Each structure stands twice: as structure tokens, then as C-alpha cells.
Image: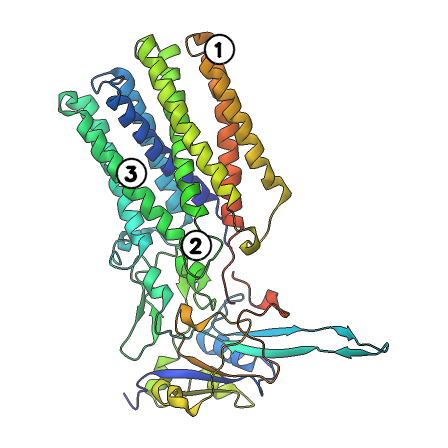
Amino acid sequence: MCSHWSLVLFTLLVQSVVGNVWCIQLAFFFNVCRTDSLYFRYQIIVALGLVLLGLVAAMAHLGTATASINAAKNIKRSWLSREIIAVNFFAGVLVIITALTFIKPEFLNSWIMLGESVIGIIALFSMIRVYLLRTVPVWNHVQTPLTFLGSALLLGAVSFSLSLTFFSLTMGIGPETKKLAISQEIAFAVMSIGFTLKVFAAGRYPFWKAANIEPSMQMQPVMQAIGFFLWAISMLQVYRSEYLFGLLSLAAIFLVTGEIIHRIRFYNNYKRVGL
Amino acid sequence: MGFMWKRPAFILDAQICTGCKTCMVACKDKNDLDSGIRWRRVVEYCGGEWVALPGGTFHQDVFGYYISMSCNHCEKPICVEVCPTGAMNQDENGIVTVDQTRCMGCRYCEWACPYSAPQYDPTMGRMSKCNLCRDELEKGEMPSCVAACPTRALTLGEFSESRSGQVLHQPMAPLPDDALTSPVVFVKPHKNSKPVDSRAGIIANPEENKDV
């Protein structure tokens, strides 16, 4: 199979931004985030930067990137065409939201983020369907949607929590302490759900249909378990800022590294029926 | 334009195919294909071993046969289904071709096709594939692979006539289940052919069939 680094980056970055948007929406729901706040603007900028990076990575995968303007021409039948449109639409709305935070913040409200959250669901769904190919049994399995959804929640929570903590503790522009703590609890809950889905997906992995199982890839569950444990400890320090960012960063390193390893394994295990 | 087939279909007699690969070379020559790009591939499938019998004797069940396979221009072409740009398309004669002005080289069709028909051309950054030598068919000639076959193991027929029972077709390993894409191809079985999902043998020449 061809080199898949660009797809590893694309899928992880886009899924992390989708999860990040969901976390922001939850923060609005629990009334711990405001659209006119400086930290919201910076969080949106981080999300936009990550999704644009993901799109650049996707273009790097193409043999003739200039022909990608044709990518919407088979939307009737091709899930890849639908995914390209959905992800670009998701990124486009994020561009508009980012611009509004600077130009007309009064136009922003939690309904816009809800709309973007729904577009994120559609983008993630179409991304999952791309890989449910009837001729690739190892991907055409329940572990694919579980893995992708788990990654979105886990990475989204990581980027949401880290960026919020950074803005609060380093730049001093975060929400008040109590709201910051609630935001961190939201992120931890989302990350826990994502981690649980990943564990469940790993337990249902169709190893017998995979191309190969590399021993180094078994590090992924260990690293993510360590990351989960560190994050859980950080929740005990959520009111003590001097430890919070350090613990969260360490947890993030383990979790993100585990995700990268897992995604590489996903592509390495590609095995098609037939010739 | 001369005679044109309604729905042409390759017919392979695996019983007499010797695996000489003349068909593969003829295709590469006619289409000027670069090294590593194989619109037609010859797969050697073999297996078997010594089996101990009661009384201390041994019996061998070694088998081997060749399958020459290109694009099967399927009834349910998964490449056409998945292509995001519509570059993969099927014409009124059932021939699946790639419109290289539209192709962006995402290789999704390569992931999907169970016959390895779409082949990525790294110099062009686009996919390429067998087009059943449509230009030859329109002149009333045979595709170059069919014309070159020295044993006449590889021939061409009308899909409707062949399907009506005149050609015995049996899917066999290592080919995938016909139900996946309904290939428009007929493979007359070898006497030792194994069923589609058999794990009795291996592809003995993977290097000649791997993707670029």
C-alpha cells in the first residue's frame, strides 16, 4: 500500500477538530464559555489552524492535487466525494466563525457552534463510510466507526483542554477558576468516553483479517492507558494551576502518541480480498 | 467505426494457460506501460505438500495453475462507485475506463478493486487501467493480450452469449467472490482449481502482482 503518513495526519487532525468543536459546544451548553470572550477566539483559531493543516496533509496524498476541484463530481455514489465536501464545508464554516470573532462577535451565539457541531458529525460519518469498503474486510468492521469516534472524542478533548489551560494559565485570558474547572471536567468526561470506545474497539479488532500485527504497535493501548491515568490525576489538581498544565501536557503526549501509533496500524493492516 | 461488441467479456481457460505472460507483455508493449504498471497480470497459484499415508508411504497433493487477469469491466464496478471525481466511468458497452483529465490520483479505486485493475502511474500522478483495447475492438480486431496468446487460452466473447451457458465459468482461488463486483469475465476452471475462499495455496509470484 502507498505511503499513508498524509492520511494519518489528515484523519487525526480533522477528527481532533471535530471533537474540539463538540467540547466547545458542551461548554456553551453548561454555560462556561462565551462567544465574546478572548479565549473562545483563540480556541477557534487553534481549531482552524489544525483543520487547515489537515487539509494540506490530504492534498499531499493526491497524485495530481490540481485535479481535486473535480472531487465533488460523484457525490451521488462516492463516499469519498461526500467526505471531501463535508470536511471542506466544516472548515469553511470554521473560517467564517473565526472571522466573525474578530469582525462581528455580536453575531456569534451558541447556535452557530451547534450548527458546526452537526456539520462535524456529518464530516466524521462520511469519513467513516470511506473506509467501510466491502472488499477490505479488516476495515469493513465495527471497529472502524468505534475507533474514529473514539479518536474524535479523545483528541478533541485533548486539544480543547490543553488550549484552554494554556490560555488561562499562561496568557491569563481564560474563564474564571470555577468555569475553568467545569470545562476541564467536561473535557475529562469526553476523553473518558473516547478512551472507552477505543478500548472496546481494540477488543473487537478483526486481527485474523489484517495484513500484519507488528509488536511495536501493541504499545498503543499501554501509552493511552498511561495518558488516561495521568489525566485522571490532573483532575485532582484542577484547582492548583502550577501542576495542571504540566500533568495535562504529559497526558496529552501519551494519548496523542498512542493515537498516531493506532492510526498507523490501521493503515498498515489494509488487506484487500482477491488479487 | 467497424464492428463493435455489445458487451465484450474476457474468457480464460485456466486448464490450458501456461503462465507464459505473453498477454502481459503484449499489453505493456501496446500501451507503452512503464515498469511496475501492469494492466494485465498473470498470477501463479499453487500449494500442496507430502501427505503421510498409513503403511509408511507418502502421497503428494501438489497443485498449481495460472490465472491471467486484467480489468473485468464488472457489472457492479466498485471503482466507478467509489471514485470521487467521476474519472472512473463505464460506457454503453460496459467498458470501464479512467478519464485522466479528471483523475486526481487519490488511489481510492486501487484500495477498492479486488482485481488490482486500477494501476497508479507515479510519473503522471494519476490512475491507469485496461480499456479492453477499445480502439482495436472498433477496428474489428482483438485486444492485444487476446491476439498474442499462443495457446488461445485467453479469448473474447459476447457477455450475453457466454453467460447463457455456452462457457463454463467457475470462480476459483485466489480470485474473490463474484458477488462483490459481478465481474464480466469467464474463467474455465483448471482441474485442480480450488474454491474462492480456499486457503490451500498461495500466490507464488507476489512480486509480479504487487501495487506500485
Q: Do discs 1 and 2 share a chain?
A: yes
Of tags 1 and 2, the one toward the viewer is 2
Q: State the SS at label 1.
A: helix
Percent position of residue B203, x then y: 61, 69
Instruction: Provide the chain ID for the residue under circle 3.
Output: A
**Is A184 situated left or right of A271 in this image?**
left
Label 1: how many Cα within 10 Å (few below 14, some 14–19, many 20+) = few
Write down the chain letter for disc 1. Answer: A
B18 shown above or below A156 = below
Q: Are marks 3 and 1 on the same chain?
A: yes
Q: CA distance from mark 3 to mark 1?
A: 33 Å
Q: Which residue is mark 2?
A: A140
Image location (x, y in percent) of residue B73: 38, 74
Q: Is residue A30 left or right of residue A152?
A: left
Q: Earlier in the sequence, mark 2 or mark 3?
A: 3
Q: Nearer the viewer, residue B23 or B73?
A: B73
